[in-house]
Image (cartoon, rainbow, N blue to C red):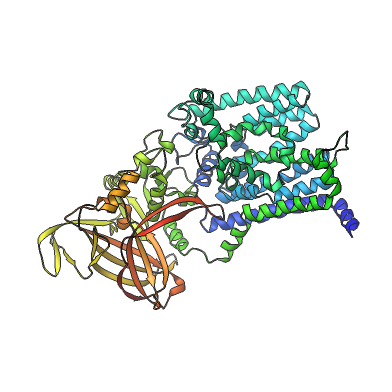
């Protein structure tokens, strides 16, 4: 039976390999498109690169507006130019996602040739399977879009000609590899060093080293010319070592213990384990083939935080080609190379326990794919009902003209990125460019502003703890309020915390917040200085500082928009009062964080069995007037409009609200998007019951 299987594999190996590649490309393309359709790309990179491709395909090379000064201030990636010709056929983010899946899938073919040439066709098929099931490959494929996805297929071809000693083809193809990104030049330099160690033809030593150095220095000059500091803004990651390249290099030698302590952190070992485990740690048996990636590895290992997530994102693709090549040579040296002299331990284990060794290698591939890759998350998300908020988002997006200049939050930028003028609300909110190298002001031509108030909670999680943005976070709400007032932004539509505004647009309900001074006389209702009566039909002390004093106009309704979007939603107005200036808890929080405590509104639905069947978090007053700004002597009036779950239609439920203090992080989720993960939720008091409704 085994012989028959081997015979079939040998006779049909080419068809099997290309069928596997085609299956990978089809599956990952479909999953990527499904993820895009369901609005799951929210990490900004897809939006950035789609806008760059869109502008380039229209003749405006490397142009983008999400970050000022264009894409050349981020990376030097000439490969984008020929790829934009393919993109021009169908200008869409989905085109980029299919191109990415295709490039990563096609990398399996030159990898097969490398393994076949070095060992045999059987190992070639084995490494094809290991590549197509590698968790880092799948994770990178699903995390946004990056040009580094084209590195493996191009570098494998370069190595084929290196392995075959075909210098002319090697020399012609190596510059194409360098066009992927500026830091690939470090790999080229390392490849020349590897050639020297392997005593190869001098041309394989001198050419990649000289070309790599020239390319790197030239790329840095081009990037520096497009940044406010005159150097790559990503030097921020290494600012703990110094403020310039020379300072960083000097401090490595002046403070070696600090450098080594940082390099040997547990998170770095977690990254190494995640990269090597899928190949059963074979690459460490031929470490010299890892020399070319020492530079990129140090670049990742010296980043202060988040390194354990490298295999969940795209960064691992810089290291993976050489890791696989090292594994190929380790397999050849330890499993298939004719013994010369004394055998090592691995040789002996392979000779005595061949079946057990093959089983261990196979188990490493499958186990890593399931536990470190996204297949489980993909299946769970596909069979789960889509987020009902997606309908609201699509409804809002349809109202923005195709070519209108617009500012939007990161999670919605990809779906607006096929336009010339696109701006990030992250920069607007914090008032700084990326890594706070310079101030940011929303360009005056921005006509539409899309504000996701739930995203403001994410801003707090991210920016308050970010070393570049933390000092600019105070006053972000005031900065946003001033922008809306000065530019004359008026509300066009709002659904579930999504606010669409237009500069000098038609007047509409503000939907934000009203601040009223309290008049001296009050009976059953409070009278404000503008003679507006505030009903005091609810009196709930949220904590010793805040009190919910009134509710108006709570009405669930069924709505069908002209575009066919149907939903159930609830509108209501709340009136708040600050009882005193601060409390001990807030002082403790401010001492620990440098920021006053801000509370979020927890909106809940409770069934007759006292079970919370729905819960969402929103910033009070749409995040424009946070609770830390509320003053004594004010009545704070906030408008609310929230979606009601379709699954609960027809049911009678209690509506509850509660002020809570949230702490959390933004991290990578199971389908390689960015999600908010709440670590602590501090309830300040029992929830206030607003009343009972029946969802229409």
Q: Position of residue 553 (x, y in %)?
A: 26, 70
Q: Quadrant of residue 302?
A: top right
The answer to whether residue 401 is visible is no
Could you say which is closer to the camera, residue 348 or residue 112?
A: 348
- How many numbered dots are placed on residues in this image? 0
The answer to whether residue 611 is visible is yes
Q: Is residue 48 above or below residue 608?
A: above
Could you say which is closer to the camera, residue 354 or residue 569?
A: 354
Residue in the image at 71% along x and 21% along y: 206
Determine whether, in the image, residue 562 is placed left or right of residue 343.
left
**What quarter of the picture does the N terminus occupy?**
bottom right
Q: Position of residue 345 (x, y in %)?
A: 80, 41
Residue in the image at 83% along x and 39% along y: 117
Determine whether, in the image, residue 299 is placed left or right of residue 628.
right
Q: Quadrant of residue 605?
A: bottom left
**What quarter of the picture does the C terminus occupy?**
bottom left
Could you say which is closer to the camera, residue 272 or residue 53?
A: 272
Q: Position of residue 474 (x, y in %)?
A: 31, 43
Residue furthest to the left in view is 521
Could you say which is closer to the camera, residue 207 or residue 420?
A: 207
Residue in the image at 68% along x and 54% along y: 367
Q: Position of residue 298 (x, y in %)?
A: 58, 33
Q: Is residue 227 above or below residue 22?
A: above
């Amino acid at each position: 039976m085994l012989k028959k299987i081997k015979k079939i594999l040998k006779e049909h190996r080419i068809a099997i390999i290309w069928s596997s590649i085609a299956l990978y490309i089809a599956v990952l393309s479909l999953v990527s498109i499904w993820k895009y359709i369901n609005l799951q790309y929210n990490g900004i990179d897809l939006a950035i690169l789609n806008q760059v491709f869109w502008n380039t395909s229209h003749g405006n090379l490397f142009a983008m507006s999400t970050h000022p000064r264009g894409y050349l201030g981020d990376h030097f990636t000439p490969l984008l130019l020929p790829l934009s010709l393919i993109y021009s056929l169908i200008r869409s983010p989905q085109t980029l996602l299919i191109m990415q899946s295709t490039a990563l899938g096609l990398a399996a073919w030159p990898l097969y040739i490398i393994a076949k040439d070095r060992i045999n066709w059987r190992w070639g098929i084995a490494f094809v399977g290991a590549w197509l099931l590698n968790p880092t490959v799948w994770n990178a494929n699903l995390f946004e879009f990056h040009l580094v996805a084209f590195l493996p297929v191009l570098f494998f071809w370069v190595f084929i000609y290196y392995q075959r000693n075909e210098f002319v083809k090697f020399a012609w193809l190596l510059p194409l590899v360098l066009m992927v990104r500026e830091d690939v030049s470090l790999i080229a330099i390392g490849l020349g060093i590897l050639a020297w160690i392997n005593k190869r033809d001098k041309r394989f030593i001198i050419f990649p080293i000289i070309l790599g150095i020239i390319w790197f220095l030239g790329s840095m000059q081009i990037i520096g010319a497009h940044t406010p500091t005159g150097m790559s803004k990503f030097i921020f990651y290494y600012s703990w070592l110094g403020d310039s390249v020379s300072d960083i290099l000097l401090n490595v030698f002046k403070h070696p213990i600090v450098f080594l302590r940082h390099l040997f952190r547990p998170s770095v070992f977690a990254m190494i384990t995640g990269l090597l485990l899928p190949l059963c740690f074979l690459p460490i048996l031929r470490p010299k083939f890892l020399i070319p990636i020492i530079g990129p590895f140090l670049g990742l290992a010296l980043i202060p935080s988040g390194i354990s997530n490298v295999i969940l994102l795209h960064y691992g693709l810089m290291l993976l080609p050489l890791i696989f090549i090292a594994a190929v040579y380790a397999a050849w040296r330890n499993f298939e190379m004719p013994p010369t002299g004394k055998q090592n331990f691995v040789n002996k284990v392979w000779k005595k326990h061949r079946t057990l060794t093959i089983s261990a290698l196979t188990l490493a591939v499958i186990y890593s794919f399931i536990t470190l890759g996204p297949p489980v998350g993909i299946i769970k998300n596909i069979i789960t009902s889509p987020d009902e908020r997606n309908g609201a988002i699509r409804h809002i997006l349809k109202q923005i003209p195709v070519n209108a200049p617009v500012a939007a939050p990161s999670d919605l930028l990809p779906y607006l990125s096929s336009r010339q003028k696109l701006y990030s609300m992250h920069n607007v909110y914090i008032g700084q460019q990326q890594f706070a190298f310079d101030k940011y002001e929303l360009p005056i031509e921005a006509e539409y502003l899309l504000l996701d108030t739930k995203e403001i909670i994410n801003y707090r999680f991210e920016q308050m703890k970010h070393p570049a943005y933390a000092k600019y976070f105070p006053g972000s709400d005031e900065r946003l309020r001033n922008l809306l007032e000065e530019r004359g932004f008026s509300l066009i539509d709002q659904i579930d915390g999504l606010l669409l505004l237009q500069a000098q647009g038609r007047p509409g309900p503000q939907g934000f917040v009203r601040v009223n001074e309290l008049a001296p006389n009050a009976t059953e209702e409070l009278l404000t200085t503008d003679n507006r009566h505030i009903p005091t039909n609810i009196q709930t002390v949220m904590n010793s500082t805040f009190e919910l004093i009134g509710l108006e106009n709570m009405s669930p309704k069924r709505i069908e928009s002209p575009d066919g979007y149907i939903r159930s939603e609830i509108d209501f107005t709340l009136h708040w009062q600050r009882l005193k200036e601060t409390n001990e808890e807030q002082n403790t929080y401010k001492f620990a964080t440098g920021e006053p405590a801000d509370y979020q509104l927890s909106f809940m639905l409770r069934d007759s069995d006292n079970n919370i069947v729905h819960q969402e978090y929103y910033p009070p007053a749409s995040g424009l007037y946070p609770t830390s700004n509320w003053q004594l002597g004010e009545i704070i009036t906030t408008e609310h409009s929230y979606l009601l779950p379709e699954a609960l239609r027809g049911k009678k439920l209690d509506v509850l609200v509660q002020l809570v203090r949230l702490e959390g992080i933004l991290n990578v989720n199971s389908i390689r998007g960015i999600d908010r993960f709440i670590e602590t939720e501090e309830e300040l008091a029992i929830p206030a019951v607003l009343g009972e409704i029946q969802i229409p």
